[in-house]
Image: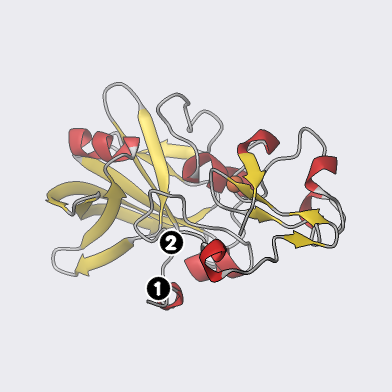
Amino acid sequence: MNTEAFFTLTYGLYIVSTQTKKKKNGYVANTVFQVTAEPQQLAISCNKDNFTAQMIAESGFFSVSVLEQNASKEIISRFGYKSGNDTDKFEQTAFFESPEGIPVVTEGCLSWFTCRLVKTTDMGTHLLFVGEVLDGDVVDEHKMPLTYDYYRKARHGRSPKNAPTYIKPENKKEKKQPETKTSVGQKWICTVCDHIYDPAEGDPEAGIAPGTPFESLPDDWTCPVCGAEKGDFEPYEG
Ligand code: FE
């Protein structure tokens, strides 16, 4: 199986949000699509371990905000790689509440929809939620939507482990490629998002020059993709 084939499927990136009586929560999804035009219905696929999934089932409502191409690393990290179980993701996020009480993220987004849950299908690891669209708007027509392909290729992003489209990084041990070390040192992998720090490349966006070994990164350096701390990395034996 050539898993690269999966990467040729096109997806966008979205923030799906909801609110129960107790709290608001949201996560980054890439599986959002319109299933019918009449009525207008959207479907989303959500991992059962995802705290937001349990909350959508409980509240019966969700919103979808379409991330724009230049959405900040912070907002993707906040909603994409952190659990809302112990944090309030909305505390530092621009959003509004629909008349039904659904939080709708506007920060880093170019459009949004609000939906009432009409059908839930158990897909094993994931729940497929279908929602009837209640409302929607374009916030900024001049912005481009962030596609998963662009996120992967231009922004070096990866699906978190509970995304339906998650693909394990290649286990190169099996392929016997002893290229674990570059001339400037060991590669390290983020245990949260699988981003690989390659000392040969450094992290130019964070001012880390190519040729900087992982051990020399400042203590407050964080994963450029998910914002995890240095301690969340482990040597990459790929
Ligand atoms: Fe990461």
At x 66% / y 34%, what residue is drawn? Answer: 231
Above or below — where is 155 with respect to 214?
below
Where residue 43 sits, quadrant-wise, is bottom left
Observer able to see residue 203: no
Residue 82 placement (x, y as % from top left): 49, 37
User: Looking at this rendering, what residue extends furthest in the top direction?
Assistant: 22
Above or below — where is 59 with respect to 14?
above
Element class at badge 1:
helix
Residue 186 placement (x, y as % from top left): 75, 53
Instruction: Indicate if the residue with disc 2 has its beta carbon within 8 Å of ligand 1.
Output: no
Residue 206 placement (x, y as % from top left): 79, 49
24 lies left or right of 190: left
116 lies left or right of 194: left
Tags 1 and 2 in contact by the CB under 8 Å rule? yes
Instruction: Indicate if the residue with disc 1 has its beta carbon within 8 Å of ligand 1.
Output: no
Observer able to see residue 75: yes
Q: Callout 2 environment at 10 Å: few (<14), some (14 to 19), or many (20+)?
A: some
Say which label, 1 or 2, has the lower sequence index. 1
At x 54% / y 60%, what residue is drawn? Answer: 68
Query: Relative to the observer, which residue lies in front, 199 or 33?
Result: 199
Could you tell me the amino acid type at mark 1? Answer: Phe
- The C terminus sits in image quarter: bottom right
Q: Which mark is residue 6?
A: 1
Q: Total marks drawn?
A: 2
Distance Cα–Cα, label 1 vs label 2: 9 Å
103 lies left or right of 226: left
At x 60% / y 46%, what residue is drawn? Answer: 190
Residue matched to label 2: 167
Residue 20 placement (x, y as % from top left): 27, 28
Could you tell me the amino acid type at mark 2? Answer: Ile
Q: Callout 1 environment at 10 Å: few (<14), some (14 to 19), or many (20+)?
A: few
